[in-house]
Amino acid sequence: MAQEIQQSFARKSKPTHYTVEYAARSLCARKLSGDYYDFLDISAGRMAFVLADISGKGLPAALLMASLRASILAQRPDAFNNLPRTLKRVHELFYESSPPGHFASLFFADYNERSGCLRYVNCGHVPPILFRDDGQVARLGSTAPVVGMLENWNATVDEVALSPGDVLVIFSDGVIEAKNTAADDFGSDRLIQVVRNRFYLKPVYLAETVIQAVEVFSGFRRQDDATVVVVRVR
């Protein structure tokens, strides 16, 4: 029943924007996932891409994931005009309702399709990788501590311009930390190679390709929740 409820979190309708197409693929290490991803309609011509990774696995992580999700969705759309203040409030709610020692990494990005600007806050999350159409690669590093660990918490916003043909890959650490039988990590270099080899696939197929590569590499042993969000600029 809990699994069915968690699966119902996936949105039945998603924001539609002419300048981007996007998709996600997620695998659970157990029956329930501690990864949370979402696509939020902020305002006309603006949307948010969200990916969070809760510490731990299984039911405890799933409960905290639901709490974090509710804290984000409870914010008014215009609150995201001030990302540091809004995410500080999300942190406070999560901090107050989480047992000691539990936390979440969070990547929250606000995309404006008129300007092509992506404003983001990376709360201790594994850096998403931006693949430029000309072959260059950039990583969107941390701009804030993880959510829920520190009582005093502040964030800064960074931004990057997205151009037609660019692909942004946001992922949880379960992707790059997946291990094979020799205890080698899948790693970010292997992820980059997989994406480059299938760069022109639609996001839904590219996300699936990454997840399949992780499963094959790990011998289909799911050691951690793994989520991939792919965003392509048209």
Image: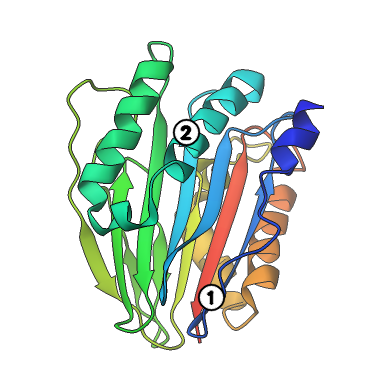
- Spatial CA span between label 2 and label 1: 33 Å
First-in-chain label (2 vs 1): 2
The disc label shown at residue 110, or none: none
Q: Residue 150: horizontal and vertical position, in percent?
A: 24, 22
- The residue mark sitting in front, 2 or 1, is 2
Identity of the residue drawn at 48% across and 84% down = 19
> Residue 35's x, y, as percent?
57, 39
User: Label 2, on which residue?
Assistant: 68
- Residue 226 lies in quadrant: top right
Res. 117 visible in picture: yes
Percent position (x, y) of residue 217? 68, 49
Is disc 2 placed on a helix, strand or loop? helix
**Residue 93 placed where, x, y %?**
36, 26
Residue at horizontal 66%, vertical 21%?
A: 59
Q: Quadrant of the N terminus?
A: top right
Observer-nearest of 146 and 141: 146
Residue tagged 1: 196
**Number of other residues with Cα within 10 Å of mark 1, as a class: few under 14, some 14 to 19, many 20 or more:** few
Q: In which quarter of the image is residue 98?
A: top left
